[in-house]
Image: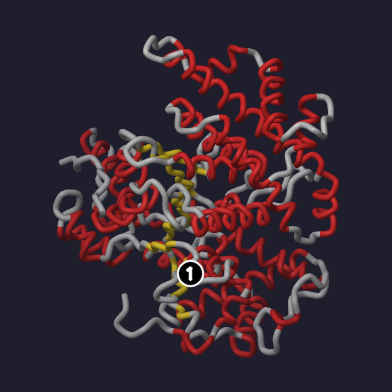
Amino acid sequence: MGKPAWKIVPRPLLETVLNNHAQRHRVHQPLFLHGPRGVGKSSLLLHRLLREWNHGPHLAAYLDFARSDPPLPKPWASWSSSGDPRTLTSVSTDLESALESLVERGVRLGCIGGRDVFSTLNKWHGLRSALCRVIGRRDEKMSISALWSRAVLAVSSKIDGREVDACIGDSLIGNSGNTVEEISYIREAVLSLKLAKEIVRLHQQWRGEAVRHLNRTGRYSMSLARSATDWPCILIELLSNAAEVDHFQPKLIINNIEVLRQAALDDDSTVSAPMYHDSFLWRLIALGVNEKSIPVILITSDSYYSCQAYVDFGYSNVFISRETFGWTPQEAKLHMVPQFFSQSEWKVIDEVIGPNPRHLSELHALMQQSSSLEVTGESGSNFEDLVDAYLAHLQVTVVNSAMESALDILKKFAEDVRNGKVADCRLHFGAPWRHPPRSSDPIKSLRWAKINLMDFVQSLVNAQFGLNYLADSSLEILDDPSAIAMLEVGLLYMQRDPSFVRPVSRGIQRCLVRWLVQEKLKMGFLEKMMFKWHRLIRGRSYRHLLKELGYK
């Protein structure tokens, strides 16, 4: 008998928290929704909330920075280890395009006018030189507002009228209910936006050589970082000032915000991705604190935003932080039994792969496929065989490939140590990773990386797969390159409250044990002796960081 189609189960408490933030027209802080992979963060937004946030006066711009064409076949993989990272140019262009679409909607509603654009731009920039460049002549006696009006006329003469009409929309132009003055007001706002963007680009061109010098030297400049994020932040400020209850309530939702921080720099005329990311968040925070901003919801599975971002930004409550871990076993059983799984099947699932929603949906799809094969007489597998097949799929497609990426990160760490790029404080006395190979032999580097990674996984097993990184002031675990590598590839998650480092799911945890056993079986006699010596003399021991007794 076939199983019913999978459905997205409501999450009333989390939905209420997100709705309370998104339904306001202006808020004081951005909201971070973070948690391990596969717990249903994106599904909840796409299938349960986004439609309501685009109804009536509400307008939501949804951005997924991790989008790819074609889509990546590994949803469990961390975006930092899933191939070539996206370029900063493409990510910033997506951000600007989404915000421009919101602003254009505000212009068509009459909420944003040309003078609003001028006052917002004039608040942060000296405009005289750029306006004179647009006009083509310099006039020191003319006021800034008069120069702006002339520059708008100059832009209108350069731009095809059909391009402006396309921004306004045929429905507004052809609507007999709109007066000539209203259409002229909207047309002026569209031209003012194009002029503002041209001025911002001029300012960035003038700072181009300074930015290239900054990238060469690796230094930091707040003014240059602000210049790189001028246009998206000006658009957000315009939207925030124009937001009005029951008339125009825009909001911005960004999924996989960590992609912006990890983007590749493909153009030396802009600052690095981490600097761009930090400047964007700083200005978003400042706008919310000083004047209030539109609701901004940032979704991520990166542990940086759960345990480190608030430290880097200086205050534990600088963001509204909402961490979700999916279902508890009891909650999952309530939703899954008997609609999707029988009682006996659920006992196997709870023991082997746990209540992670993505595991359950993938296993359900596998059961549907098996049921269709049974109808044609091509399959005779039982449920335990299906679970074993699903674990094998996880092992091959997710864990093994992620561990290969983790080994590459460790080999890069060994190379950085040889080149003196690693601070001495990370190579403190007694650290198991203190003595990487002194030569650049790739075989020795791989052997060292594998022994260290196996040592870390063994210590994780001994600690029952849960390390309390704040217990006994044991933050030195964050210096461990193996821990950092497994966090980066997405197999471990560092949660904020309570402060545990653990595998993202029980299924991934079981696959990590299988990987450790497989690697031990592959070892030759010499490698086994080296591993045993490493465990005895330099091996990690994190048993004092065991999860609290009774906490599941």
Residue marked by disc 1: 494
Whether residue 545 can be seen here: yes
Q: Who is closer to the viewer here, 333 or 323?
A: 323
Q: Residue at x 54, y 85 (%)?
A: 474
Q: Residue at x 40, y 73 (%)?
A: 497
Residue 271 percent location from the top left of the image: 73, 50
**Amino acid at dot 1:** Met
Q: Who is closer to the viewer here, 206 or 344?
A: 206
- In this view, 187 is above or below 100: above
Q: Residue at x 48, y 50 (%)?
A: 293
Whether residue 521 can be seen here: no
Image quadrant assignment for residue 428 = bottom right
- In this view, 467 is above or below 28: below
Residue 22 percent location from the top left of the image: 36, 48
Residue 403 in the figure: left or right of residue 48: right
Q: Quadrant of the N terminus?
A: top left
